[in-house]
Image: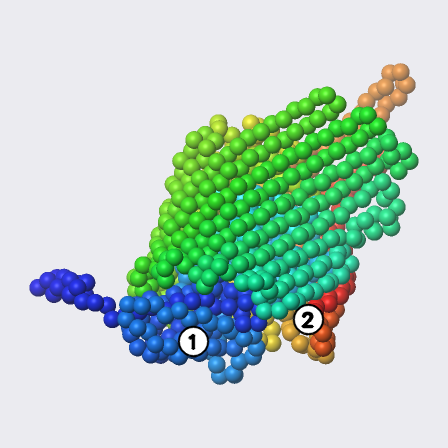
Amino acid sequence: MLYKTALLTLVLAGIAPAQVGAINGYVRDASNGEPLAYANVYLEGTSHGAASNDRGYYYLSSVPAGEYELVGSYVGYQTERRHLRVNTNSTTTIDINLDPGSVKVDEVIISAERARFEREVELSTTRLDTRQLLSIPKVGGEMDLFRAIQLLPGVIATSDFSNRLYIRGGSPDQNLILLDGITVYNPSHLFGMYSPFISEAIADATLMAGGFPVQYGGRLSSVLDITTKEGNSKTYTGHGSLSMLAGEVLAEGPLPHGSFLVAGRRTWLPDALLNAFGAEGLGYYFYDLMGKTNYEVNHDFRITIAGLGAADVLTFWDPDDPDALDARLVWGNRGVSGQTNLILSPVLYCEATGAWSNFYSNFRVAFNETDTARMTTDLTDFTLKTDLTWYLADRHTLALGADLKMTGTEMTARFDTISLTEQDTLWPLAAYVDDKWEIIPDRFFVKPGLRYSFYSNGNRHELEPRLGLKFKPGKNTAFNASAGRYTQPMVTLNSTDAIFSIYDMWVPVPDSRSTPSALHCIAGVEHWLRNDAIIEVEAWYKDYSNLLEARYGDFATAPDSLLVADGYSYGCDLMLRKTEGWVTGWVGYSYMWTRRSIGDEIYHPHYDRRHNLNVVANFPGLFWGMDLSANFTLGTGLPYAGNIGYYPRYEYIPGENETRYSWRFIQGPRDAFRYPLYHRLDAGLSRTWTLSWGEISAFLDVTNLYYARNVLLYYWDTEEGDVPEREEIPMMPILPSIGLKVKF
C-alpha cells in the first residue's frame, strides 16, 4: 500500500504545474567589474542558496513563487540585499555588484572558501588570489606564483634556486599548467628561478593537488589553473614598480562594452651583475607580457581574449674576437586564447575556449664569418574545448564537455649545408560527463564522472572514471573522499635530477610504449573553527604505472631509450588556514613517501621528502602603518647519490719514467643518501602612502633572514697529494631586496 501511495504522489506531482520559479545573474566587484568567483548568494530566511561559479554566474532553482530578500556576500566586500519577487515558471535575473569595504561587526560574511565548502565537492583544492600572492615575501624583489605554491602542503621545493613543482610524489612534467585555457609547457625563467606569470595581473590561481575532476586531463599528478584579471571596467588605472631584479608596468581600463588589461616585466639585474663581476662576453635577460580584453555582446554573451608572451635571452661571444664566436640562445612561451561565456538559457551555461600555445627555442652560434650552426625546437598546441553546465534541478547539476587538441613537435639542426629535421604530431581527444547531486540536501553529495580519452599515437583508447563524495554531519564539518584514474600522452626527455634546467623537451609517448597512468585515492576531513579559519586533513595514495623516465645521469634521453618505471606515493597533508583578521595565512604540514622501480632497481627519487612544514603569516597594519609578512620552511633531507668509497689509481708513464695517480670514487646506490635538515625564514615589510592622485608603496624583503646554511650539493676536493675531502655548496645566502611601486 505504501508503494502505491508514493507512486500516486509522484504522478500527481508530474501532472500538477510547479508553482516555482528561478533566479540567476552575475556577482561582480562594483569598483572594477571583476567577477567574484564563489561568492555566496542566498534567499534570506530560506534554504535556497548557491555559490557563483568561476565566472561569477549563479543560479537558484525551484524557488516557490513569492517575495524574498536576495543576499550576496563576499569577504572584504559589503553585503548587498535586493528585494525581489519570484513569479511562477519564470526566471528573475538579478546582477549583484558588491562594494569593497568594511562590514558591520555583527554581520556574518561568507568567504569564497566557505561557499565552496557549502556547495562544492572538491578535494585537495587550494585557491590563491592576488591579495594573498602579493602578501608573501619576495625573492629578489619579485613575487613569484610558483614560490607561493611551493608553500602549500603536498608541494616540495628541491632547492632555493628552483621553482619547479613536485606535488604529492609527482614530477614537474606531470602537472598541467593553464593560463586562461592556454597550456604552458615550460613555465620558468632564469634557469628555474621564476615563473612567467606577473602576479599583479593574476586574478586567482587554483591548485588541484590530486583527484581533479573530469574537465581536466592529460596529466598524472595535478592541475594549476590560473586566471588573468579582466581589467577595470569602471575607470583607467595603472601602476609601475621597480625592484632589484626587474621593472614592471600594468595598465587597465574600460572599453565600450568591456575592459582591458596589459602588463609587462623585464629584468635588468642579471646583465648588471654579469658586468659587475667582469663576465665579459656574456649577457642575459628575460621578459614577460600578459594581456586580456573582453567584450559584452549582451547580458548573456561575453567574449574574452587573453595572451601571454615570455622569453629568456642568453648571449655569449668572444670579447677579444667577436667574429670567432658569437652565440645567442632564445627560448620562451607564447599563446593566445579566446573564450565565450554564454547563457543559453537560465539552466544552461556554456563556456567555449579556443587556444594556441607555443614553446620555442632558437640556438644560433657563429664560429667565424662563414660557419654558422643553428638548432631550433618548437612545440605547438591547438585546443578547442567546450564545457556545458546544466542545472537539471534544485541541487542537481550535470557538466558535459569535449576537449580537442592537436600537438606538434619539431626539432631542426643545421650546419653549413647539412640539415636534420624530426617531427611528430599527437591528437589527444576527450569527452567527459560529470554529475553533482545532493542526495540529502546540505548533507550528502555525490559527484561521479567519466572521461574518455583518445590518443592518436598508438591509437590508444583510455577510460578515466572518477568519483567524489562529501558528507556533512554538521554545519561546520565535512568528510570527503575521491578516487580516479588519470593518463598522460606526453613526457619530457630531460632528467628530473638536474639541479638547474634551462627548459624541458616534450615528446609524445612512443607508439611502442603503454600510456603512463595513475590511480588517485584521497580521503579527508575539513572543519571550520570559525568563519575565517578552517582546518583540513587529507590522506592520499597515488599508484603509477608505465612511467617513462630519462636514464639516470643523462642530461636528456632519446624517446626510444626512455626507461619504463612503476611506483607509488602516499602521505598525509594538514592545513590550518585563516583568511581574515589581524593575522592571515596558513600552517601546512606534509608527511609523504615516494618510491620508484625500474626493473630490479628500487629507489626513492630526489624529491622524496618525509616531513615538510610551512608557516605563512601576514600582519596587515601591524605598526606605523606597515604590513609585516613572513614564511618559514622546515623539511627533512632530500635523497642524493653519494660515494661510498674512494681509492688511488696509479698509472706508469714509460716515456717519462714517472708514476702518476688519481683518485677514483665508488658510487653508492641511486639516491641512497640524504642531505641534512632544510630550514629557511623569509620576511618582508611594506608601507603604502595614499596621495590625491594615487598610491606609493615601498617594500623591503629579506630571503634567508638568519642565514641558514642549507646544502645544495656535495663535491669532493682532490687536491694533489691530499686525501679527498667532501665539500659542500650552499644554497641561497641572506638576500635583501628593496623596491618601489607607484599606482595611479
Q: Front-most of 629 and 185? A: 185
Label 2 crowd bin: few (<14), some (14–19), many (20+), radius 10 Å = many
Q: Is 180 above or below relative to 92?
A: above
Give the answer, above or below, for where 647 lies relative to 195. Answer: above
Q: Quadrant of the N terminus?
A: bottom left
| Residue at image location 72% in from the left, 63% down from the top | 240
Placement of 492 over or under 2, stated as above or below: above
Q: CA distance from mark 1 to mark 2?
A: 34 Å
Please provide percent x and percent y for residue 55: 48, 61
First-in-chain label (1 vs 2): 1
Asked whether the residues under the numbered discs 1 and 2 touch, taking CB atoms below 8 Å apart as contact, a structural biologist would say: no
> What's the amino acid at mark 2?
Leu
Q: Residue at x 55, y 30 (%)?
A: 424
Rendered image: mark on residue 71: 1
Q: Is residue 630 left or right of residue 403?
A: right
Q: Nearer the viewer, residue 30 or 62?
A: 30
Instruction: Give the foreground label among 1 and 2.
Output: 1
Secondary structure state at the residue bearing disc 1 = strand
Residue 556 horizontal side relative to residue 435, left or right: right
